[in-house]
Image (cartoon, rainbow, N blue to C red):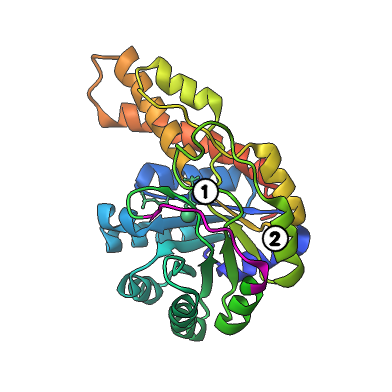
């Protein structure tokens, strides 16, 4: 069933677990996430970035996601990830997304407040939840780029939430988008800062850039010919610590990308005679489903639907 982001996150916040938010770029990824959520009896966010909406076509991808959410047996939030273009945010609200993120983290504080409040004023009358971002999460993907990490200031976070009335807040505590998260080692989250933010802010907190970059997936991809640089992620033990303190939504995209393409590489190498796309995309879909099921167990959302 399609549910509001606020409903799912307020429950997770109260009961101290996190809901996974997984990025959708095509039909197979969407199906994998929904199947995992149903199998694990877990609530879930399916989210599309502006880059994904541009790639697949906004109407096409949005309607696929809304359809999948409505027919699912578990609570599914259809969410815009890192909305930056107000026209895209508006279109997603009109189409019936149950949550949108406005990412104004690249603006100065006052401009971020002003634009986020504008989105809240557009979304709330329709009952749609708004995630905002304060501080900058590092890293580069297709459309989501920040050269430097600026960690979230706890006092500013309180002022930001009070002035914008956003429903949840993405914070920067040392994570980074993409696979080259940390040049030489796994992430070390600033958990003391998270405690300070939690003490001041009472909306659910969101962790972006949270892929763990599982060694097995990277090694498997490398075994089938991928030429990856050293990849580092956020160790799951740190994610668990962060959830205990107060993280209610966790974004994962990079891990899905690595898993999906690792499965495709395997078919290309092992079955060079194969040319039916379904024979590549089917195993890739299964690989993502396993990964999402695992994340739901780690996040504590399994069984919470
Ligand atoms: O946080 C960003 C997401 O992983 C989406 O990245 O702009 O490459 O689709 P993208
Ligand atoms: P990763 O790149 O670590 O998967 O983060 C994804 C994300 O934050 C999407 O908003
Ligand atoms: Zn993100």
Q: Nearer the viewer, residue 123 or 186?
A: 186
Marking on residue 209: 1
Q: Dot 2 surroundings within 10 Å: few (below 14), some, or many (20 or more)? A: many
Helix, strand or loop status at disc 2: helix
- For the record, the magenta segment spans 144-155
Residue 193 location in percent, x, y? Answer: 70, 58
Circle 2 is placed at which residue position? 12
Residue 235 location in percent, x, y? Answer: 63, 36
Residue at image coords 48%, 59%: 69
Left or right: residue 190 versus residue 84 is right
Q: In this picture, is 242 found above or below 205?
A: above
Helix, strand or loop status at disc 1: loop
**Quadrant of the rendered structure where residue 92 is?**
bottom left
Residue 54 is inside the magenta segment: no
Left or right: residue 56 versus residue 110 is left
From the viewer's perspective, is the residue at label 1 or at label 2 nearer?
Answer: 1
């Amino acid at each position: 069933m399609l549910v509001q982001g606020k409903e799912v996150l307020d429950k997770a916040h109260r009961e101290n677990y996190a809901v996974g938010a997984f990025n959708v770029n095509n039909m197979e990824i969407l199906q994998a996430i929904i199947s995992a959520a149903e199998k694990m009896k877990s609530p879930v966010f399916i989210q599309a970035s502006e880059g994904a909406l541009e790639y697949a076509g906004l109407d096409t991808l949005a309607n696929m996601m809304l359809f999948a959410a409505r027919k699912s047996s578990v609570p599914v939030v259809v969410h815009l990830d890192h909305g930056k273009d107000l026209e895209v945010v508006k279109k997603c609200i009109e189409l019936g997304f149950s949550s949108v993120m406005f990412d104004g983290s690249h603006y100065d504080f006052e401009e971020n407040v002003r634009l986020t409040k504008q989105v809240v004023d557009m979304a709330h009358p329709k009952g749609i939840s708004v995630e905002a971002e304060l501080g900058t999460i590092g890293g580069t993907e297709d459309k989501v780029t920040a050269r430097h990490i600026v960690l979230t200031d706890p006092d500013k976070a309180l002022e930001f939430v009070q002035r914008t009335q956003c429903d949840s807040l993405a914070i920067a505590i040392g994570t980074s988008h993409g696979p080259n998260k940390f040049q030489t080692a796994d992430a070390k989250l600033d958990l003391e800062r998270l405690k300070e933010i939690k003490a001041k802010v009472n909306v659910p907190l969101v962790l972006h850039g949270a892929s763990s970059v599982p060694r097995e997936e990277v090694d498997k991809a490398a075994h089938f010919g991928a030429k990856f640089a050293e990849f580092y992620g956020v160790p799951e033990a740190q994610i668990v610590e962060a959830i205990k303190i107060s993280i209610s939504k966790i974004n994962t995209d990079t891990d899905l990308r690595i898993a999906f393409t690792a499965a495709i590489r395997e078919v290309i190498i092992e079955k060079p005679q194969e040319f039916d796309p379904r024979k590549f995309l089917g195993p890739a879909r299964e690989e993502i489903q396993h990964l999402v099921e695992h994340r739901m167990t780690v996040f504590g959302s399994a069984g919470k639907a």
